[in-house]
Image: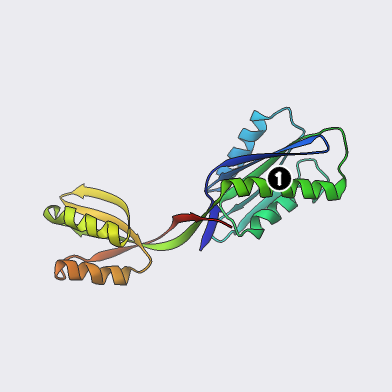
Amino acid sequence: MDLGVGESAAAEIEIKRSRFLAQACRVESEEHARAFIADVRAAHHDARHHCTAFVIGARGDLQRSNDDGEPAGTAGRPMLEVVTGRELSDVVVVVTRWFGGILLGAGGLVRAYGDATTAVLDRAGVRRRVELALGAVAVPMADAGAFEHRLRQATDVVDVRYEGAVTFTVAAPDLEELGRQLAAWSSGSIRIEPMGSQWRDVPNRTV
């Protein structure tokens, strides 16, 4: 199972006249994360700091953080700890700070960046994802309508192609069980061909 943010979101907090704007975005790669960071920098070029944290990969294998001029360990690292503490992946968070003239100290910065990250992730929500097996199901054109209805009730139809026969790409937790259902529906004439796996979203939940 994998967790990712449900929607892109923004949240703002103010501490001792310093303004912290946190933005979170779902991303699929490091390049996507860095492009989002660059966009935030360009949009808020008047701010002093754009501190960042992102986690990429189905199991959170790639983790990066950056203090962007704040004292080492006071911004990016606490942001990253909030993300990993929620077991999220494929997400980037940017916290932009406009300095208010009052020093917050190391402890104050850690709390501020952590609180800003918490606020934006609360607003973004969480989407749960699971790794499902992919399979191709080829059905005669004449039977496609009935089979499509049954497939959509039994599993997740990812794609439909019309090339003589109708081929459905489906995602299911158990291809063998789906294969048995197909055999029962078609008197053994319809089979499923494995096509690897894919991470798929399931409905949001609250954390």
Q: Nearer the viewer, residue 117 or 51?
A: 117
Q: Nearer the viewer, residue 69 or 2?
A: 2
- Which residue extends farthest left? 142
Quadrant assignment for the C terminus? bottom right
For the residue pair 39 and 109, the one nearer the viewer reads as 109
Q: State whether residue 175 appears in this view.
A: yes
Q: Amino acid at mark 1?
A: Ala
Going by the image, does 134 lie left or right of 207?
Answer: left
| Label total for image | 1
Give me the residue at 26% from left, 65% from top.
192
Q: Residue at x 83, y 45 (%)?
A: 71
Residue 24 placement: quadrant: top right
In the displayed orientation, state which residue is furthest to the top: 46
Residue 92 place in picture, x, y as percent: 61, 46
Side of 157 relative to 38 (left or right): left
* Residue 141 against residue 39 in the figure, above or below: below
Residue with the most extreme front position: 206
Asked which quadrant contains residue 105, the reply is: top right
Lateral position of residue 200 relative to residue 175, left or right: right
| Image location of residue 163, percent across then percent down | 19, 48
Of residues 34 and 190, the one drawn nearer to the viewer in this rendering: 190
Q: Is residue 195 above or below residue 50?
A: below
Query: Where residue 29 sits in the image (x, y, percent)?
Result: 54, 48
* 12 sits to left or right of 173: right
Q: Residue 37, how many percent across, how many down?
A: 63, 39
Would you place residue 20 above or below residue 187 in this image?
above
- Residue 66 visible, this angle: no
Q: How is the image coloured?
A: rainbow
Q: Which residue is mark 1?
A: 116
Mark 1, secondary structure of its residue: helix
Crowd band around label 1 with a 10 angstrom C-alpha radius: few (<14), some (14–19), many (20+): many
